[in-house]
Image (cartoon, rainbow, N blue to C red):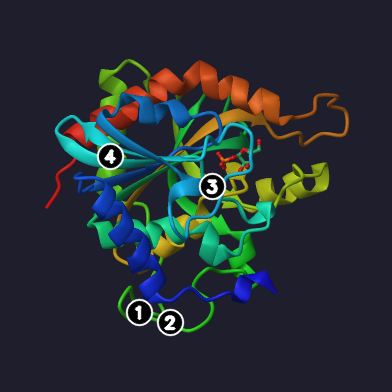
């Protein structure tokens, strides 16, 4: 089964060494752009960018709205690396491959990971276009053993049994709330629990009702494995979900979700997400 694939420390190191030989940038912050949020990378100054297909060991993006480029550059005086396109389990990647860039970032010297995604809302008070700070996640594939940390543990990255309480940094969450107030976007800011499901189909109504009952505020098909691997290797994590649709929870509802609609909301809100992330990077303390 593909989830049992193992990637050696040398393979991560090889990719990190190749990148360091191609760019002078030594990133402190890594950003993963969710569906429709790839323009975040355009704000970086003095860019060096690489197509995933040119990076040794990197998987390929296959999803519309995920360009498949790694962009290095400066943002507010901090050196960043931005994934314009992430990898999803449903594309057929093993979870090790899905999260491959995270350990490469660690080897490049990254200390903070910012994850963004497009998600459907279950919380009754959320509207499409809202931005949710991720307070915590439920990793449904992880609960049944589909976890990128399965297999031999690499002690050079982290412990066999890493804690996940507090994996979304509280200081950065508070800072983001302050910034949203100052930017005048507090009315569209939410905080909540993200759940990852396997996809690629969107949820049935019964599944949506189940997730709602379990306390899930927003649902998507990514992010949790990245955050698990990042936390395991000691990265500080901040996460944002852009609410692109309300998940249908009623049999009377005739609406249905589609990926084009998800990308459209991404385009509408990308500027606000960019502003929030830029200010956060500006004000975050880096060791
Ligand atoms: C569905 O429209 C796609 O958007 C989200 C879902 O996970 C799914 O891949 O993408 P990101 O999580 O990559 O933002």
Query: Do callouts 4 and 1 mark residues in contact (Cβ within 8 Å)?
Result: no
Q: Nearer the viewer, residue 151 or 161?
A: 151
Q: Residues within 10 Å of mark 4 (few under 14, many from 20)?
A: few
Identify the residue position indicated by label 2 in the image: 153
Sequence-first tag of 2 and 3:
2
> What's the distance in space between the residues labelled 2 and 4, CA to CA?
33 Å
SS label for mark 4 = helix
Identify the residue position indicated by label 1 in the image: 159
SS label for mark 3 = strand
Q: Residue at x 23, y 47 (%)?
A: 27
Could you tell me residue 25's position as x and y percent?
21, 44
> What's the distance in space between the residues labelled 3 and 1, CA to CA?
25 Å
Q: Residues within 10 Å of mark 1 (few under 14, many from 20)?
A: some
Q: Residue at x 19, y 32 (%)?
A: 282
Identify the residue position indicated by label 3 in the image: 194
Q: Nearer the viewer, residue 110 or 281?
A: 110
Q: Nearer the viewer, residue 23 or 114?
A: 23
Query: Do callouts 2 and 1 mark residues in contact (Cβ within 8 Å)?
Result: yes
Could you tell me residue 285's position as x and y percent?
14, 44
Sequence-first tag of 2 and 4:
2
Question: Does 37 appear above or below 28?
Answer: above
> What's the distance in space between the residues labelled 4 and 1, CA to CA?
28 Å
Identify the residue position indicated by label 4 in the image: 174
Query: Do callouts 2 and 4 mark residues in contact (Cβ within 8 Å)?
Result: no
Sequence-first tag of 2 and 1:
2
The nearer-to-camera label among 4 and 1 is 1
Sequence-first tag of 4 and 1:
1
């Amino acid at each position: 089964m593909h989830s049992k694939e193992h990637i050696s420390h040398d393979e991560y190191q090889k990719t990190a060494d190749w990148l360091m030989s191609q760019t002078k940038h030594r990133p402190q912050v890594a950003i993963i752009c969710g569906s429709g949020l790839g323009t975040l990378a355009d704000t970086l100054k003095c860019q060096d960018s690489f197509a995933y297909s040119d990076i040794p060991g990197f998987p390929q993006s296959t999803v519309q709205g995920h360009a498949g480029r790694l962009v290095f550059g400066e943002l507010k005086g901090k050196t960043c690396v931005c994934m314009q396109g992430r990898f999803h389990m449903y594309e057929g990647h093993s979870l090790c491959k899905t999260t491959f860039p995270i350990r490469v970032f660690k080897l490049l010297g990254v200390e903070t990971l910012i994850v963004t995604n497009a998600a459907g809302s279950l919380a009754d008070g959320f509207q499409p276009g809202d931005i949710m700070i991720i307070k915590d996640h439920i990793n449904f594939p992880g609960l049944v053993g589909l976890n990128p940390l399965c297999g031999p543990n690499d002690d050079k990255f982290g412990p066999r049994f890493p804690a996940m309480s507090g994996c979304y940094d509280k200081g950065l969450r508070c800072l983001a709330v302050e910034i949203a107030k100052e930017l005048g976007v507090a009315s569209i800011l939410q905080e909540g629990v993200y759940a990852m499901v396997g996809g690629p189909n969107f949820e049935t109504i019964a599944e949506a009702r189940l997730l709602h009952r379990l306390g899930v505020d927003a649902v998507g098909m990514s992010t949790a494995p990245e955050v698990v691997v990042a936390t395991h290797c000691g990265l500080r994590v901040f996460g944002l979900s852009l609410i692109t649709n309300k998940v249908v929870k009623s049999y009377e509802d005739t609406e249905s979700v589609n990926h084009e609609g998800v990308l459209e909301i991404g385009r509408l809100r990308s500027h606000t997400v960019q502003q929030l992330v830029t200010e956060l990077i500006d004000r975050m303390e880096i060791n």
